[in-house]
Image (spheres, grey):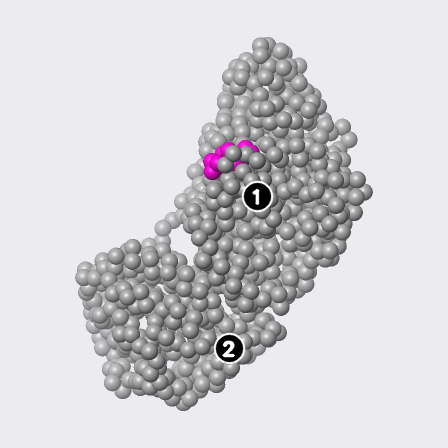
Amino acid sequence: MAPPAIQLLVTCLIDGLFPEVGESVVEVLAKAGVEVAFPPAQTCCGQPAFNAGYWDEARRMARNTIEVFEASPDPVVIPSGSCAHMVRHGYLELFADEPAWLSRARRLAERTSELTEYLVDRLGRTRFGAASSARVAYHPSCHLLRGLGVDRQPLALLEQVRGLDMLRLEPECCGFGGVFSIEQADLSGAMLERKLAAIEAANVTAVTGCDVSCLMQIEGGLRKRGSRVRCQHLAQLLAGREPGLR
Amino acid sequence: MRAAFHRRVRAALADPGLQAALDRNAERRTRARLAALATLPDAPGVRRQAAAIRHATLEHIDQHVDALQRRLAENGWQVHEAATAEAACAQAVAICRAHGASLVVKSKSMVTEEIGLNPALERAGLRVVETDLGEYVVQLRGEPPAHIISPIVHLTRQDVGALFHERLGIPYTDEVAVLNAAARRSLRPAFLEAQVGISGANLAVAETGSIVLVTNEGNGRLVTAAPPVHIAFIGIERVVPTLADLPPLLQLLPRSATGQILTSYVSLIQGPRAPGDADGPVERHAILVDNGRRAMAASRLSESLACIRCGACLNVCPVFREIGGHAYASAYPGPIGSVVSPGLFGLASHGHLAKASSLCGACREVCPADIDLPSMLLRLRDESVRKVPQPWWWRWGMRTFAQVAGGPRPFGTALRILGWVTPLLPTRSGWTSWLPGPLGGWSRWRHFPRFHRRPFRDRLRGLNLAARAVDPTPLVERTTRPLPRAVEDVDLIGRFQRELEAVGGEVVRTPASQMPAALGRLLESTGCSQVLLAWPEGKHLPDRASLEAALRGLATAKILHAGHTREACTTLEQAEGSVGLTPAVAALADSGTIVIESGAHGALATSLLPATHLAILDARDLYPTFADWAARGGRSLLLERSSVALVTGPSRTADIEMTLTIGVHGPRRLIVLVSEAQGSDPFRSGR
């Protein structure tokens, strides 16, 4: 039987800001025996513009994404809950009045998964031979948890990391919210402070999760405070990397 | 608008009093809901049902509103349609003027906040008294409510203590029970003196022409029963087609709103006082308010009209958690407010509220009507960008972003350029510590990672993308825990007793044959000085003659008939020594609820004004649930009676810091004497 093959939608944040996270994602997928393809014409899924209300701009990026990933019938894997939510749900909203694009968006949505969802539900794998003696907090990011209903999958993966002392943070928003973090900076900052207080109270050395956007907000806040706690994408943890998004 | 909102947000974040108040009740607001929902055997199923009812009704809203209007008119309501806020207020003013009213009492109603009713009535020379404790406090403070369910969520008990000291002249205290008592004392005369009572409507049933009011303190019942004229403001979207649609909504509304299985009181009001009735208003007016709702029903926001105003989305919202309600500057704050405020009042004045959300989806998760609030907020953002001027840098930034991300070549190049440029910004241990211009908001709270000179797309060649087989250790883990199932409840009386006692009511069981003696003992034990008897002829057990015989045996108490209830309980001191004795015409086991009907015996006031309410229930009138009752005895009762009250425990409030206090405007004690005929368990006898 041919090994499973996927197309990686790496997300613009990982592409530009956290390429090491992308490397860990590829490593984890390769460990699972998956053939990874990276369509180089991919850019951004359009979520920042969509969330900001700039839907014409978002459609441009969404059309590009649909075209790029239509070229192959292979499943699309996204190491981000919110970008996967965008492709699976946001596109249907964006193209509600354009039947031709809507049906293309639907077909793409059907074969799109978030990374942990793909590993656990599609491949049925949770063990990647990772080990860690750290005490790590898992942040259930909002779009992943509530938008996609993905919670059990990352927890199952973390449970299989040998020696890991893991706790799940309360499912409360970190305050990122895309442009919200800039446009409503004070609100976003106040929400972040609450999250950071919870992390400090948890007495952990690292925070992990499935969305680099939230982790960027959290690590940015931790660094601003002078905290030594760092964030890492779950793929980095599975790949045995040290904490720190980059 | 946007700048003013930002100012209010900053002020709220920096307000230590507000933050203290929000801190004190944040957890209570969410915990109670979860506990109450856990008592439903199939909460997700009930939610699906409730949502389906709401959304299906909205699709044919005109038809259902017409049916409601017809039925209300048949029941004797005077029905008014109001297309706008101004029209709705004008109608209320006209009704008050026609009756020469000078004093109006109000129970809590968000639609009257929406239309600005109080200022309109005051401009017309009327004195308006809000009687819900929280609303009373904000009225004294001259500000709007801060939450659609908990008006004074922004205040601490110390704030209320200082206010009452200043405005009511009582010695300063921060004891919640004392504060509640002070409000009660000051409001009591208003109920009995007002010429007009004004309420909202949580729901309205087209089939029976019923206005449904879900309340706790008892002020809602008093406002709709004591003054000679009652005006109900009904947002047209609150219509439900049939009585059978009510149970899932009533199961979810109190649970979602205050974490109660049922509120102390649910009033089902069919019409004005019927000929021969001892109490109830002689005139009831229904003002059906559109004020933008039909337009919204035809818009992309139509789904949000399914809201039943439980406030759960406010309670879980992390933004509301930080800033409270006033920063929204709308009658409707929080997530639902950020949708319906622009929907009803316009994009230009309220569209910016749609941005006051991180789209975390907590609101959608808790919504009993399953409204996709994040999608509504996104649609509003789309509308705003197309119709309302936006800051130039956002427009420019998004356009540039779309151009760059429209294809691979400019995108990759842009990433590489950023990788060279961003390290020029001030840096601390590898992350950017300062960002320019509109991005400065980010770096006020956090550092920003630097773009990489070698983006992921430039590393493909170095990555070993070929498949590598490793240990295949499949996972067999998928645990699906079965939902807890409802215990088959055969012991209805036991269940009724447990539920009622859980909310502070008392249950005394007696064999039917020993009923009169048991009643005598019970009344003696209360030490009351007067018993107010509201007992109809015939039909109920025990019959009136033997009941009166039993009461004559009482040594201490004076026996009065219901016709005297108002005079006998005008002051709180009088009420204190009084017991109102009424039949419970039915009871609902799963919520510990008794049913009180209007009629010639005068049970409406007698079950409400005395400090103790003693109801006698024939165990054969016990039903498992509201749905069972509604499907059988309930429907015909509603068709017969101008008003029916479902009573679940003593009157209560949790307005001040969510601290429960028993006994507000209604009784402090509720005792149900259950009379059991031997060997006649109602469930087994198959009634």
Residue B396 point in image, percent of width and height: 51, 82
On the image, numbered disc 1 is attached to which residue? B137
Examine the structure image and report whether residue B65 is included in the region drawn in magenta: no
> From the viewer's perspective, is residue B646 above or below residue A179?
above
Horizontal side of A116 relative to B120 (left or right) equals left
For marks 1 and 2, give the CA distance.
42 Å
Q: Secondary structure at mark 2?
A: helix
Where the N terminus of chain A falls, by quadrant?
Answer: bottom left
Q: Quadrant of residue B169?
A: top right
Which stretch is magenta?
A: B173-182
Q: Which mark is residue B394?
A: 2
- Badge 2 amino acid: Trp
Residue B464 point in image, percent of width and height: 24, 82
Q: Residue at x 36, y 53 (%)?
A: B480
> From the viewer's perspective, is residue B289 above or below residue A102?
above
Residue B493 point in image, percent of width and height: 49, 28
